[in-house]
Amino acid sequence: MPSHKAPDTRTIILDDPAQLAGVYAGITISLHGLDFTNTWTDYIFPTIAQAERGYFANETGPDGQPWPQWYFRASWAPTEHPTLHVSGALEESLTGRGSGHIETVAPNEATYGTNVPYSAIHQEGATITLGIDLIGRGGEHRPAGTVMTIPARPHVGLTEQALDEICGQIGDAVIAQISAGRG
């Protein structure tokens, strides 16, 4: 008959909420030394990349709101193109397929994003002074030096669904490592 190891459980009865500090300290000690590098690179970063692909495909931000249109382009840009898709560099960097992609894991943090210079302007929106001439979709001309407002089109962030999935992946990784005796 196979032997089954009884689960390691502890019952904690708190008479005062201040006692939670000790509980959290114990959890911190248990998690110290766990390595989540593979969890990030194998599961979480691909989840984020998939979410980013969805934002660009649907032209919506993480909050589900459609991106406002921008009706001006550089003379070299295609006449018609999806929002934030003139060259594809921004999308490719955020989905892990292009230059400018940032993906790092350190013991207490992970970073995912892009260093494409214009990403922040599109994420937050900005009032800018044009450095080049722009052509409107209706043929109107905006010369260099014109002040224009670029609307915010949030493209970096997580939906509630993606965040729930990532939290589940982290929880699974913690349980797996503690169960394997590494915590």
Image: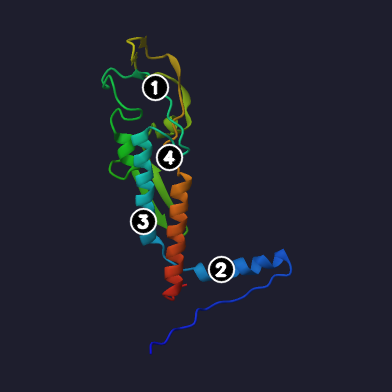
Q: Are marks 1 and 2 in contact (CB under 8 Å)?
A: no
Residue 77, given in percent of the width and then of the height, sits at 27, 22
Type of residue at label 3?
Tyr
Label 4: which residue?
156
Q: Is residue 147 visible?
A: yes
Circles 3 and 1, Cβ within 8 Å, touching? The answer is: no
In terms of secondary structure, where does tag 2 sit? helix
**Between marks 3 and 1, how big is the CA–CA gap?**
34 Å
The label number, if any, that marks residue 43 in the structure image: 3
| Mark 3: few/some/many CA within 10 Å (<14, 14-19, 20+) | some
Horizontal side of residue 15 vs 63, given as left or right: right
Q: Check disc 1 and give the amino acid type.
A: Trp
Residue 172 percent location from the top left of the image:
43, 64
First along the sequence among labels 2 and 3 = 2
Say whether disc 4 or disc 2 marks the residue closer to the N-terminus.
Answer: 2
User: Whole-Å distance between the Cαs marked 4 and 1?
Assistant: 18 Å
Left or right of 76 in this view: 30:
right
Above or below 111: residue 28: below
Q: Are marks 4 and 1 in contact (CB under 8 Å)?
A: no
64 or 166: which is nearer to us?
A: 64
Using the image, determine if residue 68 lies above or below residue 7. Answer: above
Residue drawn where x is 73% and y is 67% of the image? 16
> What numbered label is drawn on residue 70?
1
Where disc 1 sits, the SS reads loop
Disc on res. 27: 2
Q: Are marks 2 and 3 in contact (CB under 8 Å)?
A: no
Q: Amino acid at mark 4?
A: Val
For the residues labelled 4 and 2, the Cα–Cα distance comes to 31 Å
Residue 85 marker = none
| Local crowd size for mark 2, using a 10 Å CA cut-off: few (<14), some (14–19), many (≥20) | few
